[in-house]
Amino acid sequence: MNTAPNTSAPRRRSWLVALPLIAFAGLAALFWFKLGSGDPSRIPSALIGRPAPQTTLPPVDGLTSNGAAVPGLDPAAFKGQVSIVNVWASWCVPCHDEAPLLVDLAKDKRIRVLGINYKDAPDNARRFLGRYGNPFAAVGADGNGRASIEWGVYGVPETFIVGRDGAIAYKLVGPITPDNIDRVLRTEIGKALKAGT
């Protein structure tokens, strides 16, 4: 009589236990490569070609420039001139990196640079702009984030180009960088300036 233990059952069970782990690792690798290989600034926006949101935002409390109060965001500001709308916050690390580039961009007198200050304390917003300089002709305080939702913001920073007709012409997801300011943003600004002439 053969009394040798049957070892095939435990092996089969250990393989079945490992199968979900292998499947999870495969899916995780697939998501990693698919999400990591994409350019987040290329996320499409349903708002491209549509009028900019008509949300009026109050000014950042106590924010001044050259002794005058900086106004809040008025949707009427989008008509007649190409506008750059930057959604930012003092607590946003990439916003600190892009701030000097925005100050430089604001020197272009063919465009108007406007800001939406996202879920920020007025003191912190004023300190942030005092540190880097204020590129904004107007800054709207979006304390609860509702206006940014209307703009379709995924997260700060994001930058929009609004054409002379008041329609959103382009959306840059993520920070303005030395690499994309000329290659992408200034190119799209040029297109918006030509479209309005």
Image (cartoon, rainbow, N blue to C red):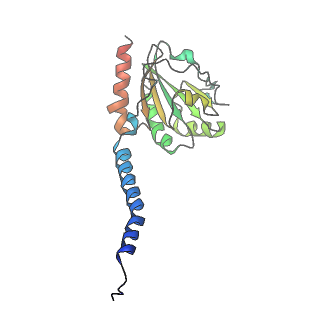
Is any atom of residue 189 visible in this view? yes
What percent of the width, then of the height, locates residue 45?
44, 28
Q: Residue at x 40, y 53 (%)?
A: 28
* Horizontal side of residue 179 vs 111, given as left or right: left
Q: Vertically, is 79 above or below 38?
A: above
Find the residue positioned furthest to the right. Answer: 61
Toward the top, the furthest residue is: 197
Residue 147 pos. (x, y %) = 59, 28
- In screen coordinates, is 107 left or right of 90? left
The N terminus, quarter of image: bottom left
Count all numbered tags in the image, as a single digit. Answer: 0
Q: In terms of image quadrants, where is residue 124?
A: top right
Residue 189 drawn above or below residue 37: above
Instruction: Name the spot of residue 187 as percent of width and height, x first.
Output: 33, 26
Towards the viewer: 173 or 100: 173
Q: Is residue 94 above or below residue 18?
A: above
The quarter in which the C terminus is drawn is: top left
Residue 80 position, x and y percent, is 47, 12
* 123 to 192, vertically: above or below: below
Residue 106 makes an appearance in the image? no
Q: Nearer the viewer, residue 35 or 192?
A: 35
Of residue 14 and residue 184, the one placed in the foreground of this image is 14
- Viewer-proximal residue among 83 and 110: 83
Write the residue at 34% across / 15% down. Answer: 194
